[in-house]
Each structure stands twice: as C-alpha cells, then as structure tokens.
Image: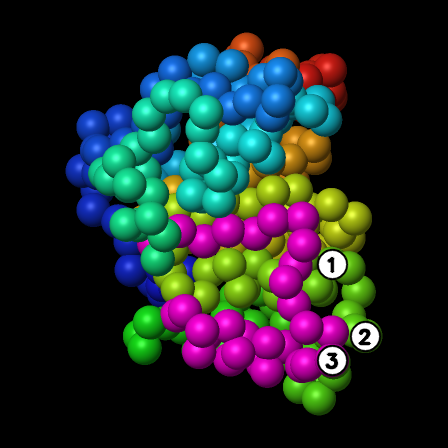
Amino acid sequence: MHSASSSHSEPAHFDPAHSEPAVVLQSISKLFGRFAALHDLSISLAARRIYALLGENGAGKTTLLRIVAGLSRPSRGNVGILGSSDVRAVTARIGYMGHATLLYDELTARENLNYFRGLYAPSHAASADELLEAVGLAQVDPKRRIGQYSQGMKQRLALARAILASPDLLLLDEPFSNVDAGSIATMSALLGRLRDHGATVIVVTHQLEALARVADEWITLHAGTIVKREATHNRVPLSAGRGEQ
C-alpha cells in the first residue's frame, strides 16, 4: 500500500503537471461490431491525481477504464500506461475494482485478503490487518463471513483487495454504488490518502458528492468521446451541476 496511514508527506516541490503522465491515450477507438463505444478519444492524465470519470450509461466509461487496465484492447489508437506502451508490462502496478467485488462470501475478510495476497501481491504488500484498518473494517468480528456483510462493507473490502499490491494506478468502476454514506466517506478519504502518497486514481461514478472533497479533475464522456474536462477549482457547486450525470 502507498503508506496510506503513514505520516510521510510528498516533497514540497512536486508538481504533477511536470511529471511523466500516468495515462496517455492517442486516437483511441473501440468497436463492438458497428457500434463505437469509444471514438477517436485522446487524453493525457498527470500522475498523482484523482480523476472523476462522468457520463450517462453507455457513454464509454467502463470501456475506457478496461482499456487503461489492460483488460480490453482498443480497435485503433495507442495506449501508454505508467510510461509503457505495453500495458501487460505494468499490470502488476495497476489496481482494478470493477462492478463485481470478486470476493468469496463463504470466507472472512482476512481470508479473502490473504487469498488474493497469495495470488498476486508482492511479499512487501500491506498485511490484511493494515488493509482492514485502512478501509474501516478492523473492528468487525474476524469470524464474520463476507456473505453477512452489508453492501457498503463489501465495497470497502473490495477496495482493500484492489490496493493489495500498492498500485501506482488505481481504477475503480462505480465503487460507491448502493453504498451507505459512512462507507462513502471512508472510501473517499482513503483515495485522498493514496493520491497524497503517490497513486493516480481514476473513478467512474454517478455520485459526484462522493468525490467532491478529493477529486482533482472531472472528465465527462458522451457517446464515446470526451466532451468536458475541468479542474475542481473551476467547477460550479454540485447543487448547480447535477445535469452532468
């Protein structure tokens, strides 16, 4: 983990705008038959920032996230992730949380995390206890199985799974869906700490309020292309900007 609970801070001179981009997409298109889920999309995302990816259902958000994660290939265009043109070469540095939690209901939280840690996490990865503390689940009965968790608790544990290997790039697809306010606050605060300790975070969401305190930029997709990109300090108040969803 990127020392999310540590007191260590980034150097005062660090400027994301002058660092190597975490993501560079050039003229990306993704076709499913004759349907273009993404159309000639280009964007460069600076490292160590939190990006909120917005848009209506079918706008191309999940398709874009899967291409960045290396789970799907574009039909056309070039992809650069964490300085590499071959996403497969950097997959160990990418954390991904999709619509499915990938958790095993019959296991406890620690058993789930230890299982996934054994699959792909490096030996120096955060322990299950550290991760549970980070997502606010450390006080839950350790014998309680995931099948007895609320949706918010499951989403928090899924986030812990996604950051097991201390990813430099964290990709989250609707992590706040059907989640209670307390879990949203815990998760968004953790994302802010991960960013502050070096991670780049891209979050697909329809819940703008969830990222209001931590997002650096807001990117809106429509019909497979980017129609708006703005920094947080340039955004109108949320109460006046709900039309973006």
Q: Residue furthest bottom?
A: 143
Residue extent of the magenta highlight: 93-121
Q: Name which quarter of the figure residue 70 lies in.
A: top left
Seen from the viewer's position, the closer of residues 223 and 37 is 37
Q: Nearer the viewer, mark 2 or mark 3?
A: 3
Q: Which residue is mark 1?
A: 152
**Front position in the image: 192 or 75:** 75
SS class, disc 2: helix
Q: Give the residue furthest to the front.
A: 33
Q: Position of residue 200 (x, y in %)?
A: 39, 42
Give the percent coordinates (x, y) of residue 119: 45, 73
The image position of residue 171, as x and y in percent, is 49, 45
Indicate whether 51 appears above or below 55. below
The front one of 92 and 54 is: 92
Toward which corner of the image does residue 238 lie, by quadrant? top right
First in residue order: circle 3 vs circle 1: 3
Check disc 1: other Cα within 10 Å, few if <14, some if 14-19, many if 20+: many
**Label 2: how many Cα within 10 Å (few below 14, some 14–19, many 20+):** few
Q: Are marks 2 and 3 in contact (CB under 8 Å)?
A: no
How far apart, in angstroms, are the residues tagged by discs 2 and 1?
12 Å
Q: Where does label 3 land, which residue?
A: 106
Q: Marks 2 and 3, how far apart in space?
A: 9 Å
Residue hosting label 2: 148
